[in-house]
Image (spheres, rainbow, N blue to C red):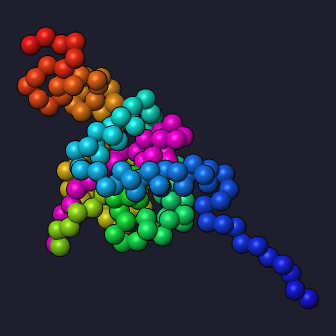
């Protein structure tokens, strides 16, 4: 006697469409120049609460199960962006980081941190050197990288500011 069996589609289920949308957006954003990517992610992080390690790990596992390209060795940038965006859809934001491995071979890498720990990485935070970090605090007006003053990081005043 045989039993008919249907395997669930990858990415199907609760949050499947939103998760796939976050992954698709991540591949588009991953093609941006680094400074522009940081600014877009900083805007996305505004108003979010810090993500917990457990919820970030759950989202990471879902992203890796849904996208083979994100699961690959070279998919760290779209994977980390997709995890951050998918977490943001639930109101949370992990610390998104882009930098380099601190040990040879020194290669570029992108990852997420939650509660001060790397999520889903074989390396500890000390093994990685961040060059760009987007945290929840960047969305707060007046802090480095945040707010809507157009002159952040320049000597020119932003809209509505005097010199």
Q: Is residue 100 magenta?
A: yes
Q: Is residue 131 magenta?
A: no
The span picked out in magenta is 84-104
The location of residue 37, given as percent across then percent down, is 29, 46
Instruction: Left or right? Give the position of 98 relative to 5.
Output: left
In the depicted structure, whether residue 32 falls above or below residue 46: below
Instruction: Left or right? Give the position of 106 relative to 56.
Output: left
Report which quarter residue 111 is drawn in. Answer: bottom left
The answer to whether residue 155 shows anywhere in this view is yes
> Where does the C terminus fall, quadrant-wise?
top left
Along the line of sight, the residue nearer the viewer: 108 or 102: 108
The location of residue 145, given as percent across then percent down, is 24, 33
Q: Residue at x 26, y 43 (%)?
A: 36
The location of residue 102, given as percent across then percent down, is 18, 63
In the depicted structure, whether residue 132 falls above or below residue 45: below
Q: Residue furthest bottom?
A: 1
> Where does the N terminus fall, quadrant-wise?
bottom right
């Amino acid at each position: 006697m045989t039993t008919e069996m249907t395997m669930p589609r990858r990415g199907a289920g609760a949050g499947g469409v939103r998760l796939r949308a976050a992954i698709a957006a991540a591949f588009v954003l991953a093609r941006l120049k680094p400074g522009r990517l940081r600014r877009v992610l900083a805007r996305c992080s505004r108003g979010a609460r810090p993500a917990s390690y457990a919820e970030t790990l759950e989202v990471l596992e879902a992203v890796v199960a849904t996208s083979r390209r994100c699961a690959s060795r070279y998919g760290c940038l779209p994977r980390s962006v997709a995890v951050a965006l998918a977490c943001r859809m639930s109101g949370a934001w992990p610390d998104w980081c882009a930098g380099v491995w601190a040990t040879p071979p020194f290669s570029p890498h992108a990852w997420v941190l939650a509660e001060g720990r790397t999520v889903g990485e074989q390396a500890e935070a000390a093994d990685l050197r961040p060059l760009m970090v987007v945290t929840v605090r960047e969305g707060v007006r007046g802090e480095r990288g945040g707010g809507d003053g157009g002159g952040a990081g320049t000597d020119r005043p932003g809209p509505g500011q005097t010199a």
